[in-house]
Image (tube, rainbow, N blue to C red):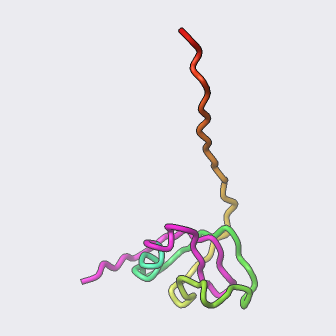
């Protein structure tokens, strides 16, 4: 049997005003299943765009599973590894 939760909280990249969701990269492997597993689904999105502006072929989760949308400003953390020559000891 599948797991059903009372609340599922999911982070998505884009959503339209109807709640259709688009995820980035590896988030599309796990997040669509979690969005459909909750009785109430709350989604944190980076962008909310007008209805009809998302390509229907790129939508990962339809809006019938989404109950609430919350737009947040996400902090972009980019880490870089710098390599330098060791000084002679």
Q: Which of 72 and 52 is in front in this view?
A: 52
Q: Nearer the viewer, residue 84 or 39?
A: 84
Q: Which of 72 and 21 is in front in this view?
A: 21
Q: What stretch is highlighted in magenta?
A: 1-30
Residue 38 is a magenta residue? no
User: Above or below — where is 11 with respect to 77?
Assistant: below
User: Above or below — where is 64 with respect to 72?
Assistant: below
39 left or right, relative to 51: left
Q: In which quarter of the image is the N terminus?
A: bottom left
Q: Where is residue 33 in the image (x, y as percent from the top left)?
A: 42, 78
Q: Position of residue 64 (x, y in %)?
A: 53, 90
Count numbered badges in the picture.
Answer: 0
Q: Which quadrant of the structure image shows residue 38?
A: bottom left
Q: Which residue is drawn at 72% across and 88% down?
A: 51
Q: Position of residue 14 (x, y in %)?
A: 65, 75
Q: Which quadrant of the structure image shows residue 83?
A: top right
Q: Residue at x 29, y 82 (%)?
A: 2
Q: Which residue is drawn at 54% across and 74% down?
A: 42
Q: Which quadrant of the structure image shows residue 85?
A: top right
75 left or right, relative to 29: right
Spot the residue most to the left. 1
Residue 7 is a magenta residue? yes
Q: Position of residue 15 (x, y in %)?
A: 65, 79
């Amino acid at each position: 049997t599948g797991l059903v939760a009372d609340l599922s909280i999911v982070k998505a990249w884009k959503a339209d005003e109807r709640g259709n969701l688009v995820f980035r990269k590896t988030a599309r492997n796990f997040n669509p299943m979690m969005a459909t597993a909750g009785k109430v689904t709350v989604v944190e999105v980076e962008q909310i765009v007008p209805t009809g502006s998302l390509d229907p072929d790129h939508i990962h989760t339809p809006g019938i599973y989404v109950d609430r949308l919350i737009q947040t400003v996400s902090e972009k953390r980019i880490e870089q590894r710098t390599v330098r020559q060791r000084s002679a000891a």
